[in-house]
Image: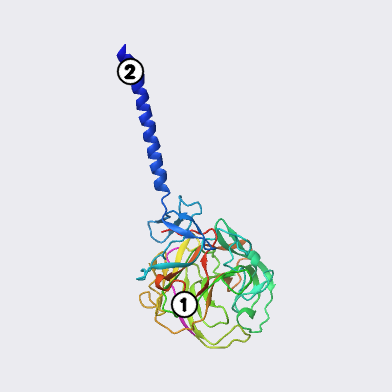
Amino acid sequence: MHKLKQKPQIIIIILIMLCLTIVGVNVLFNSSAQSPSVSVITGNGILSGLATKQSSNASPGGSEVQFGSTDNPLGTSIKSSPTGPLSPISGWHVTFADDFNSQLGTSTGQDNYWYPSQSWNPNLNNNVNGDNGNETEVYNAKNVSISNGKLVLSANYQNNVAPATGDGSGSSQSNQVQRNYVSGIVTSTTTRTGYKGFTWTPGNGSTWAFEMVSQWPIDPDGNLWNAWWTSTQGGWLNERDFFEGLNTSGKLDSDWIYQTTCTLSPNCTGTKLQDFYTNLLTTGFDQSAAFHRYTYVINPDQSWSFYIDGTIQKWVGVNGVAPVRSGSNSPMLLILNYAFNKTTFNTGIRHFDIDSVAVYQDSAHAGQSINGGGIAPGTYISN
């Protein structure tokens, strides 16, 4: 009788111990999954919380990288240091970062770092021409949008949206060919009311890295001329093209126009000096098939290199390092645009998707020679 009475008590004790074990494991798991990796400062400078680590899984071929994280609901692709280049002695500082998780605009909570037009255009309802006389697009703010945490620059065919004048005018006023597309552009101008923007000035001995993650437009027709670049905000004095998509699918160029006497006035005829490098062979992958990470690095002496998914591009300069030049030291803004240099497709809508943009500066010079910048609303930085 005594032994029979003890059995229920033993069973109850075993069940209690089992429940305590399950609860302990669950607490331990949740604590580990939520371990912070870096603190985050919002666009208004307020500590907003803690970010979690982010996964980055390379494909077996090594050419594609999948970005995103199961432990971050925003799926951030911005890291605390650029991908590819060695770290400066002082480390890296995130000078500007935007993961495009907020709508563009100047209202409270919106992303006011990007002006959805040419920087000189005062009216967002205007169609404005591209920067060269051979471009076949006009830009309009309606072709700039934020969708699913990405900046989308779309392009649609519209025959003769701006007729050719053949006037030979320079830069933004040029219209030498007929324009048949309406497309999108954004600039990080600091001169438009309500826009914080971002500009940087070269020449102070900083190490810089400009990084973006994007998926290029589909280009079966050879009409592509999308670009990620920077240029002086007042007049055309200096320009660095981090990359330009060429009119043959899978090819691109990277360059620096480091001296020019041209400005945005009509009939610009000044002579430019330029380091220009083209990947004459295809890159080995289709840039429109997946997102890839593009990183342009400027050394303190202003030599530079270009990386794709962390791999230095040896076709730039000598063994991947372009030579030192002497350029102007004027504030430069960032530009993302979807341009064309011929007319091919005439149905449907194509788009250039940008997942994130980040600018890094060596920590020893952190905050020097910049205007605007910071961390855009809804943007998180991971290790």
Q: Amino acid at mark 2?
A: Gln
Instruction: Relative to 324, say whether 283 is above or below.
Output: above
Answer with left or right where residue 293 lies relative to residue 345: left
**Membership of 276 in magenta stretch:** yes
Q: Residues within 10 Å of mark 2 (few under 14, many from 20)?
A: few
Q: Quadrant of the N terminus?
A: top left
The answer to which of 382 and 227 lies nearer the viewer is 382
| Residue under the point 36% across and 19% down | 8
| Residue under the point 39% across and 35% down | 22
Answer with left or right where residue 223 lies relative to residue 58: right
The answer to which of 131 and 232 lies nearer the viewer is 232
Disc 2 and disc 1: Cα gap in Å?
A: 84 Å
* First reached walking from the N terminus: tag 2 or tag 1: 2
| Residue under the point 44% across and 56% down | 66
Asked if residue 78 shows in the view, the reply is yes
Q: How is the image coloured?
A: rainbow
Q: Which residue is mark 1?
A: 255
Q: Element type at marker 2?
A: helix
Residue range (magenta): 273-285
Q: Quadrant of the C terminus?
A: bottom left
Q: Residue 111: percent from the left, percent from the top? A: 58, 63
User: CB under 8 Å between callouts 2 and 1?
Assistant: no
Instruction: Relative to 190, say whether 291 is above or below.
Output: above
Q: Which residue is mark 2?
A: 6
Answer with left or right where residue 380 lies relative to residue 158: left
The answer to which of 345 and 57 lies nearer the viewer is 57
Q: Amino acid at mark 1?
A: Asp
Asked if residue 290 shows in the view, the reply is no
Instruction: Relative to 134, say whether 27 is above or below.
Output: above
Which of discs 2 and 1 lies nearer the camera? The answer is 2
Q: Residue 91: percent from the left, percent from the top? A: 38, 68
